Image: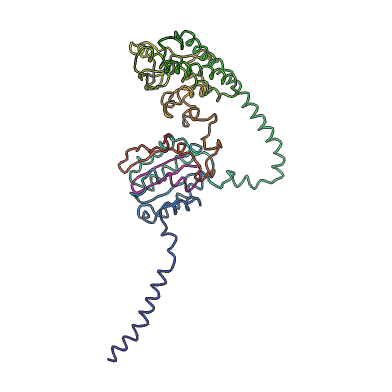
């Protein structure tokens, strides 16, 4: 009995202390490292840190995440990276979109979820095509290796990202410590340089607009002649409401093109003119089909060789001089020429080197081509023009074919942002594009947020 009592007296306080310690552990807050999910990722990314979920540290360690964070900070670019476990509740396309919404920073986003890899970018930071290509290359080079894939992607895509890291001024430390006296002395010189640069830019735009005006006036005149030759009277007995609507739309497009060209002040303004001409010619093609009792034509891009030929009827293989073959939209006449081994009827324009195909006439023709072809898929123009002089204009993501008159990504309210700016949830998902890469390495469709190029 004494032995039992002694054991009770010794074990009693120990049990009480153990119970008390367990209670304290239950009441104590969980360590920060236990946090996981989109909320924890959001908090980390807002602080400029790469986030790795605790459940994924066995595949991507915190040390690797810290090294990647240092690399991104050294670049001073808005690149945001998160590693999360697979989730059936939140699929990849929703997860990365939700991450962009919660973080609210304009930039390039990379998300590894389970064994999938996704990249997206606001168009103000990087084009959808560019970020997709870098993501595909990184994933293909390091199958299943999270650290290798993310490091490859950041190393190659990071320097191409526009803008600076959120909260960064974009100036180097050396620039900040320059004595104010020297800055004041340089102020006048900087002002003069900026003014001269603006004057030169205005002169260049005026010269490009004059160059375009000649070509666009020819396009408008050619369309007007088509309308004059059209044997159609809205009041004729055989005319119906659909035919009259097509005819009216063609006339309205003609007037819109003339009025817009008269008001043009910058080369970018020409895009709206050729958009109107393209729409007008399609209306004439629809009108002709109705009158002849044929099926209505599909909305196709104009003939690549000369948009004045009207809407294309098929795609044909063709290669420019010294360039790689590609499939281009062609009219019936040019399709027949190509099929018989003849050269197509190519639109040429005057240059300092003499008449040249429009795609070799320089970047001034970017908005002209963007109006004709830009509305038929954001990836159309780069593929058509690769290897040509004009193709360099669109290599950064089809700049002239995007909506709006400027070169930057568009957001609600008409504001202009760059990488690193904060928009919160107020962003257009159509301007947030990229690609998904699955565990097998196949390229995923990327989802569609509202019909945009995603």
Q: Nearer the viewer, residue 434 or 254?
A: 254
**For residue 300, above or below residue 354:** below
Q: Nearer the viewer, residue 363 or 431?
A: 431
Position of the N terminus, as image quadrant, is bottom left
**For residue 281, above or below residue 405:** above
How far across and how far down the image is residue 115, in percent? 33, 47
Q: How many marks?
A: 0
Residue at the far bottom: name it: 2
What residue appears at the point 69 percent right and 42 percent down from the top-left corner? Answer: 183
How far across and how far down the image is residue 274, in percent? 50, 20
The scheme the figure's colours follow is: rainbow
How far across and how far down the image is residue 200, in percent? 63, 26
Residue 114 lies in the magenta stretch: yes
Q: Nearer the viewer, residue 308 or 155?
A: 308
Position of the C terminus, as image quadrant, is top left
How far across and how far down the image is residue 290, in percent? 38, 15
Residue at the far left: name it: 1
Q: Nearer the viewer, residue 181 or 391?
A: 391
Residue 244 lies in the magenta stretch: no
The span picked out in magenta is 95-121
Residue at the far front: name it: 237
């Amino acid at each position: 009995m004494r032995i039992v009592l002694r054991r009770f007296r010794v074990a009693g306080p120990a049990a009480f202390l153990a119970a008390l310690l367990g209670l304290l552990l239950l009441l104590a807050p969980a360590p920060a490292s236990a946090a996981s999910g989109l909320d924890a990722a959001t908090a980390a990314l807002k602080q400029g840190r790469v986030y790795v979920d605790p459940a994924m540290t066995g595949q991507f360690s915190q040390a690797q995440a810290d090294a990647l964070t240092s690399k991104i900070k050294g670049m001073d670019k808005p690149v945001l990276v998160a590693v999360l476990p697979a989730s059936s509740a939140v699929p990849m396309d929703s997860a990365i979109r939700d991450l962009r919404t919660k973080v609210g920073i304009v930039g390039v986003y990379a998300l590894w979820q389970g064994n999938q890899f996704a990249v997206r970018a606001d168009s103000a930071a990087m084009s959808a095509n560019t970020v997709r290509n870098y993501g595909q290359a990184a994933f293909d080079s390091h199958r299943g290796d999270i650290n290798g894939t993310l490091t490859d992607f950041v190393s190659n895509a990071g320097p191409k990202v526009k803008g600076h890291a959120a909260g960064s001024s974009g100036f180097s430390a050396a620039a900040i410590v320059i004595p104010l006296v020297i800055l004041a002395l340089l102020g006048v010189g900087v002002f003069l340089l900026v003014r001269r640069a603006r004057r030169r830019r205005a002169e260049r735009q005026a010269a490009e607009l004059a160059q375009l005006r000649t070509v666009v006036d020819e396009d408008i005149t050619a369309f007007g002649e088509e309308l004059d030759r059209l044997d159609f009277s809205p009041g004729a007995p055989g005319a119906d409401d659909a035919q009259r609507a097509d005819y009216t739309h063609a006339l309205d497009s003609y007037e819109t093109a003339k009025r817009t060209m008269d008001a043009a002040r910058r080369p970018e303004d020409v895009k709206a003119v050729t958009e109107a001409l393209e729409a007008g010619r399609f209306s004439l093609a629809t009108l002709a089909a109705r009158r002849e009792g044929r099926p209505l034509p599909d909305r196709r891009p104009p003939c690549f060789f000369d948009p004045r030929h009207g809407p294309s009827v098929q795609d044909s293989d063709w290669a420019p001089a010294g360039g790689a073959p590609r499939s281009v939209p062609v009219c019936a006449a040019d399709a027949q020429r190509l099929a018989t081994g003849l050269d197509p009827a190519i639109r040429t324009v005057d240059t300092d080197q003499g008449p040249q195909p429009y795609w070799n006439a320089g970047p001034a023709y970017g908005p002209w081509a963007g109006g004709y072809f830009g509305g038929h898929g954001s990836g159309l123009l780069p593929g058509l023009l690769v290897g040509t002089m004009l193709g360099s204009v669109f290599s950064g993501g089809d700049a002239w074919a995007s909506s709006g008159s400027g070169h930057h990504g568009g957001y609600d309210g008409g504001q202009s942002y760059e990488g690193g700016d904060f928009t919160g949830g107020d962003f257009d998902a159509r301007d947030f594009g990229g690609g998904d890469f699955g565990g097998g390495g196949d390229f995923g469709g990327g989802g569609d947020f509202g019909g945009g190029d995603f």
